[in-house]
Image (tube, helix red, strand yellow):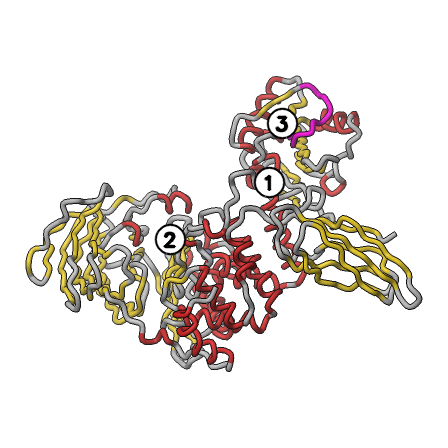
Amino acid sequence: MFNAKYLQQCFLIVLFTLLGISNIASANNITSNVNYDIQVEIDPATRSIQGRSTITVKNSGELRLLLGQRFEVTKALIEGQPLQPSADSYDMPYHSWRIPFSLGVTYNIEVHWHGELAALNTSLDHQQTLGRPEPVSDVMGTFLPKSSSWYPHIIGALASYQVNLKLPAGQRGLVAGKLIEESESAQEGYQASFEFALPAEGIELMAGPYQIATSHIQGANGQQIQLRTYFHPQIGHLADDYLDAVKAYFKLYEAWIGDYPFTEFSIVSSPTPTGFGMPTLTYLGINVLKLPFIRATSLGHEVLHNWWGNGVYPDYQKGNWSEGLTTFMADYTYKEQESAAAAREMRLGWLRDFAALSPGQDAPLNAFTSRTHGASKIVGYNKTAMLFLMLRDQLGEDIFNRSIQALWNIQRFKVTSWDDLQNIFAIVSTQDLDLFFEQWLTRNGAPLINLSAVDKTKTDSDFQLTVTLQQALPTYQLSVPIVIHSANGEQTKLLNLQQQQQTFTFNLQDEPLKVALDPNLRLFRQLAPDEAPPILREVMVNQTTTTLLLSENKETLQIAETLASKLQRRNPSIITSSKTPTTEPTLVIGLQAQIDAWLSANNLPEKPEIISNKGSAQAWTIRQTNGTTLAIISAQDNDALEALIRPLPHYGRQSYIMFESSQAIKRGVWPMQEQVMMVE
Ligand SMILES: [Zn+2]
């Protein structure tokens, strides 16, 4: 739906965007009502922090100021008078103050605090780091996330800031923003001042024994963008490669979306295996940065978050659109640049993963509210990315790109909901997109579409083809691609499917031979059971999986049981009799001779050729006639079986895999079975 305020606001900017005039930037004069001016000194060796902040608030309602309870407050003043802690303090571990409402008055608040930061635990993975919003410090690395309340902040307010950071000699650090000045000496240590003049969601501070490397590029509007790496010494040699790689992403996204809104970008290494994107920087684990493919994938994704996520802020409570749009314009776009086949492979991976979800793991997109990379990627990232692909297919690339540019011009540094985004696409395209967004944002699941009948009749001059499509309830409105094959080639038709069953008729010059339903996977849909290639994950996540152990040997049985429970992350439901496969998903584990005999006794195909001649163990999937998955694990001996326990659970996305001891030496996914009907 359109709303009047929005129409007015959008009109000029959309007009300019349509005329191809970018960067008219209603956003250039954005100011915020809250500003923090912070002096902070940190000693990672003793994990001590001392801070002073002057907070300026142009007040439009009663506000609340919070600081983490682990710190001691030595001074809290408002307009020079003591600011009393609020009595009705939260249950949460905060110092809390109320800032009274007073129209038209600017308050100056001063808070001094100090305390001890938490110890760094490098054994935490990304997920665990997200779950612990603690300010941590160590000579190997200091990370003060905004969620740790390491500085006094007004809740719910976007704020500009200045931070002056002081560290002992040998340490260097930063916060997001423009580097104003920097100095270093053996006596004075390291000092740097940063400014973030736009309304930011919060301040995150990083420090470590960094080596700094610098380069720059000329931004699209002529401004210089300073590029830096803050790397631990052990990866210092990677700096030049990263600085080079990052330049290409700025060219791509400035041309595609609009000017980069900042004057710097830094790549910062972390002692824990995290991956965060913040305005003007990305914070990636040392071991992540060492991986050669990161420059071609995650780096571009993090750069793009300066536009989506850290430039235009999602309205998290109403659904996070930014991860999906970033996945579409980064990860997926790099696959499109590689080849059409690589892009199709990525779409197939998304649909296959979605098909392998167990009940309860799915949720509508407007309920995906995670702010970070950890949460359900399959829905929050991939389904959203596919939504943008379908939207581009529907609107055309030109209108899609103009809408993207309008989104940037209108919404930068503003909290932006799915509704705001829809309005911009609707205005630029002059299409009513209510139904499109409603069906993709508010429903669980995905449409299930079948090719139910095809028929042809010969007329005097040509052939008439009828195609009947069916879809499950609730019905979606879809533009369904079908490919019609003839002796002279193939052609794609888009069928406007709205009902549960619909028949479409075409006149064709060439005799139609067969019809395929969406073979290029342009729609986010539930793959039919025989359409999706079976993958190992199906017997790992599906709670109804039966595990069949084919051995009489006690030691083999024990290893097999451990393997099954590691794969399924629960107590497996085990049978040991060698009866024929059930109708449930089944995992079969055994040594080679027993497996071969069992396959033969049940008239199942023998071990696939692609993994048959080498390796000490193999695992592969077979699609049973009722659509469920059979997964087979075959090892040459107990040692080979035991060697699978650690690595195999990581390979759920594969259809087949071969190991030499614990090393995966060959793996892959069976080809997809397209939904095809011959025209009789
Ligand atoms: Zn992301």
In primary-sequence order, the first of circles 2 and 1 is 2
| Quarter residue 507 falls in | bottom right
Q: Residues within 10 Å of mark 1 (few under 14, many from 20)?
A: some
Q: Are marks 1 and 3 in contact (CB under 8 Å)?
A: no
Residue 239 percent location from the top left of the image:
43, 63
Viewer-side residue, 8 vs 581: 8
From the image, tell me which residue sits under label 3: 546
- Give the magenta range: 577-587
**Given this view, does label 2 or label 1 mark the residue nearer the observer?**
2
Residue 546 percent location from the top left of the image:
62, 27
Q: Residues within 10 Å of mark 3 (few under 14, many from 20)?
A: many
Q: Secondary structure at mark 3?
A: strand
Relative horizontal placement of residue 557, taking residue 276 as reference (left or right):
right
Q: Secondary structure at mark 1?
A: strand
Magenta-span inclusion, residue 580 = yes
Give the distance between the C-alpha atoms of the residues marked 1 and 3, in whole angstroms: 27 Å
From the image, tell me which residue sits under label 2: 270
Residue 294 percent location from the top left of the image:
50, 57
Name the residue type under label 3: Thr
In the rendered view, would you say 483 is above or below 643?
below
Viewer-side residue, 646 vs 317: 317
Give the distance between the C-alpha atoms of the residues marked 2 and 3, in whole angstroms: 42 Å
Name the residue type under label 1: Gln
Residue 42 percent location from the top left of the image:
22, 54
Mark carried by residue 663: 1
Residue for point 63% across, 56% down: 523
Q: Residues within 10 Å of mark 2 (few under 14, many from 20)?
A: many
Viewer-side residue, 25 vs 552: 25
Name the residue type under label 2: Ser
Residue for point 65% across, 54% down: 345
In primary-sequence order, the first of circles 2 and 3 is 2
